[in-house]
Amino acid sequence: MIDYKDFFDKIVNRAGEIPVRRRIVGQMVALTAAFRQDDGTFALRFISGNEFDVPIFFNDRTGQEEPVDVDGGLFVVGTWVIVNPDSRMVAVESKRPGVGSMLIERYLQMEGREFGYDDLSIDLNQASTDGFDTAVRELDTIKKVSVTVKQPNFDWSDGHNAIHDYAEQSGADSATVEMRAPRGEGLSVSRGIVHDILGLARQRISSLRNVIVTGSEAGEAGDKTINLNRFQRKTSVRVKRGATPMEELDALAPAAEALTSESDDSDSS
């Protein structure tokens, strides 16, 4: 089991020395700020960019496109990540453009392996709201389910169920399962894959990477598709135009604290 506080303390200490730039799937990714906050959470500022994306400025006065001279640097985008090591919850600032979760996962994983966590795999699986459970149960007939799970820790012990058992026995760190009902019938909600998925979705720390449920509602024509990605726990924060990174963090902090706290009071969608 990883010691999360120790791990992120190492991240903070390393970032305070010489920020490490890493090349991940063609992108430069780096930490420009990393520190432990007064409430015990960790705030990490990720940036990413590449030398091939040359920004173009449109001059409203002249109507001309003008290239921006970055003088040997890179055009980058930034994203704040707030980590609560006690609850194991992570709040990721979502904006466009921003730094994608996959780049953040890969960066932390590469850092961890240099700290001696040789088999470390980082997956920022989403936390979902109760709305997903409600939407699935509103279906009169469930015709098809597709689910992808990722190992939630060093083993599959979190959220024990048949899908995890099969992945563990196979030595897998991820699995995708699809099941279809016979023509004119529906999948069971009280047992089997739908029952297991709904149970996993109710957990704050879940192996679910994504779920797509297809079915029909009584009295409605055509099929309805429910995607777990549409039910992520999230909230909206207003950030003033032109805010500095630290001003952005000040605006994001209260919402991030609510989303990552150990008490489960919020159900925003």
Image (cartoon, grey):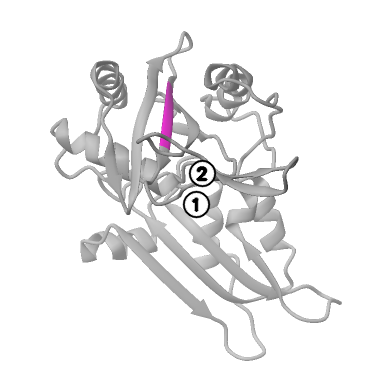
Residue 150 placement: quadrant: bottom left
Q: Nearer the viewer, residue 163 or 97?
A: 97
Residue 242 on image: x %, y %:
65, 24
Residue projecting furthest to the top? 38
Residue named by callout 2: 203
Residue found at x 53% / y 22%: 245
Residue projecting furthest to the bottom? 183
Q: Amino acid at mark 1?
A: Leu
- Quadrant location of the C terminus? top right
Residue 79 on image: x %, y %:
50, 34
Q: Are marks 2 and 1 in contact (CB under 8 Å)?
A: yes
Q: Amino acid at mark 2?
A: Gln
Q: Nearer the viewer, residue 256 or 111?
A: 111
Alpha-carbon neighbours of circle 2 within 10 Å: few (<14), some, or many (≥20)? some
Residue found at x 57% / y 88%: 182
Give the residues in magenta: 43-47
Residue named by callout 1: 200
Left or right of 29 on screen, residue 135: right
Find residue 16 and name its label: none
Residue 184 on image: x %, y %:
67, 89
Q: Circle 2 — which element? A: loop
* Alpha-carbon span between mark 2 and mark 1: 5 Å
